Image (cartoon, rainbow, N blue to C red):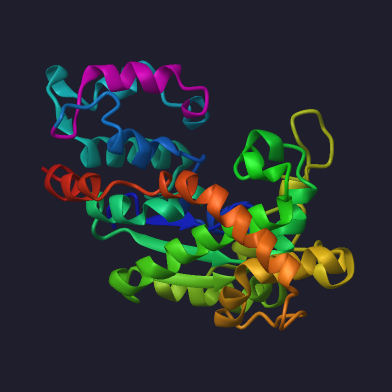
Amino acid sequence: MANPYIFIVGCPRSGTTLFRHIVGAHPQIAITPEAHWIPLWFEGRKGLTPDGLVTPELIQQLLEDPKFALFRIGREDLLTLMPNGQPVSYASFVTSIFDLYGKAQGKAIVGNKTPDSVRRLGTLHSLWPESRFVHIIRDGRDVALSFMNWSKVLQKKPGNFPTWKVDPVSTVALWWELNVRSGLQAARWLGPDLYYEIRYESLIANPAAECKALCDFLGLPYEEAMLGYCEGQTKDHENHADPAWRPITPGLRDWRTEMPTGDVERFEAAVGELLVELDYPRAVPQPGPQSLERVSMIRDLLAEGLQKLAPPEENVELAKRAGNG
């Protein structure tokens, strides 16, 4: 089982953190901290040769990245991954980082949870053709509620898009659509052996059954420890209750009772077709012309920016050549 063995992805605020805790509680699996840099640095050639091979500069950049510090891997360990300072395959280099992380956790199988990587599945698959991808999907209206109540939203996408101040509901609807469709499109070429889809609502309602099905997909035995992920983990560094470690809790968000009618109409005007495609029932089958016009305006304003978030195809092709070379 070569690492990275599993990537957990999905639109942010869809329950990926909860899912990471559940999967990471399996006795055989460790899940690393979020690592947006894995596909992005490869695509941008950060610390890499034009052919996508690792140079010593990448090590320094990793050590200066505050998020990489969460891996708790130091300079000496990183230097051992480049014997005599010779360039190595980016895929092999990152695999070795995952192996080091797993060794520190006492686990051989290592994966990663980075929600935004749902838009980078082509790059990741090209680098690690045998890695498995788990795409968690949540009703976009509940995702919107979660964004609206998120203290960090203005520092993150889509809260830092210019359209957020004009119409946050339509903005998050289109953001949800972009991420979900990225995963659905990848499912077609990844196939059932490498792509697995799970609904947040089903995970909350039937956690044991969903965890057993996931373990079947991963080729691992089901472990009840997965549902005990929060034991001894309910306090943060200041000894306050940490919501990220709360037990599985149904009803944390319910757009039916918490989302204003006008917001529901605008959300469904933007992405109603995707809701229906995913078997999420619409509350407003025929949105009014004003909602449709507003969504059209927001979509036009966002179109160019959202397009830039997709990886250039030439990066995916290069990953195929350099990933395991």
Q: Does residue 248 appear in this view?
A: yes
Q: Does residue 28 appear in this view?
A: no
Give percent across and percent down for residue 73: 42, 26
Give percent across and percent down for residue 75: 36, 17
Question: Which quadrant is the C terminus positioned in?
Answer: top left
Residue 180 in the figure: left or right of residue 131: right
Residue 73 lies within the magenta run: no
Give percent across and percent down for residue 212: 53, 75
Residue at image location 49% in from the left, 72% down from the top: 197
Above or below, 137 against 113 in this view is below
Residue at image location 72% in from the left, 50% down from the top: 168
> In the depicted view, which residue is nearer to us: 61 or 81?
61
In this figure, what is the number of numbered marks? 0
Question: Which quadrant is the N terminus positioned in?
Answer: bottom left
Give percent across and percent down for residue 129: 23, 58
Residue at image location 50% in from the left, 25% down from the top: 69
Magenta part of the protein: which range? 51-68
Q: In which quarter of the image is residue 284?
A: bottom right
Q: In which quarter of the image is residue 7?
A: bottom left
Residue 62 lies within the magenta run: yes
> In the depicted view, which residue is nearer to us: 258 or 250?
258
Above or below, 59 against 297 in this view is above
Residue 84 in the figure: left or right of residue 232: left
> In the depicted view, which residue is nearer to us: 245 or 202?
202
Above or below, 276 against 62 in this view is below
Residue at image location 61% in from the left, 69% down from the top: 271
